[in-house]
Structures are given as C-alpha cells and as structure tokens.
C-alpha cells in the first residue's frame, strides 16, 4: 500500500473515502501523488451524489460520464486528460447548482 506517501493529516480521510467507495484503491494502492483525470473526478462526484454505477462497461467510467452529461455538469471533455483546479471548481459548482434545483 502506498498510503504512507500521502499527507499524514489526510490519511484517515483518504482511508474513509476508499472504504465508502468514493475513491477506489487500485491493487491496494491509492496513488496519492498521481494527477486526477476528468473521468476519475466525475466518477468520484457521481459516486457522492448518486452512488456507484455499473463499471463493467468499457471504458468503465462510461455510466458516470453519461450521468454528468444528463445533468449538464459537463460538456464535451476528454475523459483521460487531467482535470485542472479551475475545471474541478466549475464541476463542483455545477453539481451544487443542479442539487439546489431539485
């Protein structure tokens, strides 16, 4: 496990997020130093607001992207590109606004 590479003050939160399946381990590695892709960030957000989706699709993030598109949280993106802080902030803002319409 590579959790020891994460900021020590965040280890409990990271572990809890993984236990809740918001983030997923990859072969028991969290990869705390890796950059986040659009697909990964959207999957995390959709797991928080809707819950887990079928991941047996190819690519496995397909259903998360579809929900984000249906809710107009995203427009056209390249799911494999890294997300910027600005793009993440806009994504969170749109999710917040969508939730307040309900």
Image (spheres, helix red, strand yellow):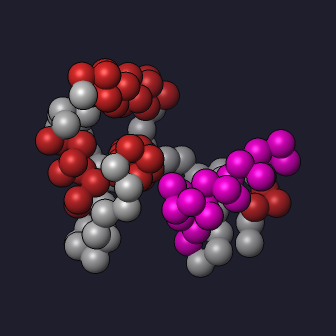
| x 28%, y 77%: residue | 56
| Quarter of the image where the N terminus is located | bottom right
Q: Position of residue 52 (x, y in %)?
A: 37, 61
Chief secondary structure of the magenta portion: helix
| x 71%, y 48%: residue | 13
| Quarter of the image where the C terminus is located | top left
Is 84 placed left or right of 75 in the picture? right
Q: Position of residue 50 (x, y in %)?
A: 34, 49
Quadrant of the rendered structure where residue 60 is? Answer: bottom left
State how many labels appear: 0
Residue with the most extreme front position: 102
Quadrant of the rendered structure where residue 7 is? Answer: top right
- Inspect the magenta stretch and tell me whether residue 12 lies in it: yes
| x 52%, y 62%: residue | 21
Res. 66 in view:
yes
Give, as a single range, the part of the protein colored magenta.
7-26
Q: Position of residue 41 (x, y in %)?
A: 42, 45
Is 21 placed left or right of 37 in the picture? right
Viewer-nearest residue: 37 or 19: 19
- Inspect the magenta stretch and tell me whether residue 37 lies in it: no
Quadrant of the rendered structure where residue 55 is? Answer: bottom left
Q: Position of residue 43 (x, y in %)?
A: 38, 52
| x 62%, y 64%: residue | 19
Q: Reply above or below: 19 against 73.
A: below
Q: Reply above or below: 66 against 25.
A: above
Res. 87 in view:
no
């Amino acid at each position: 496990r590579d959790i020891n590479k994460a900021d020590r003050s965040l280890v409990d939160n990271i572990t809890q997020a993984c236990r809740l399946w918001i983030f997923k381990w990859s072969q028991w590695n969290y990869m705390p130093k890796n950059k986040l892709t659009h697909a990964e960030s959207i999957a995390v957000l959709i797991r928080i607001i809707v819950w887990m989706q079928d991941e047996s699709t190819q690519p496995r993030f397909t259903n998360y992207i579809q929900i984000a598109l249906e809710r107009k949280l995203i427009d056209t993106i390249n799911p494999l590109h890294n997300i910027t802080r600005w793009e993440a902030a806009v994504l969170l803002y749109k999710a917040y606004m969508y939730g307040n319409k309900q």
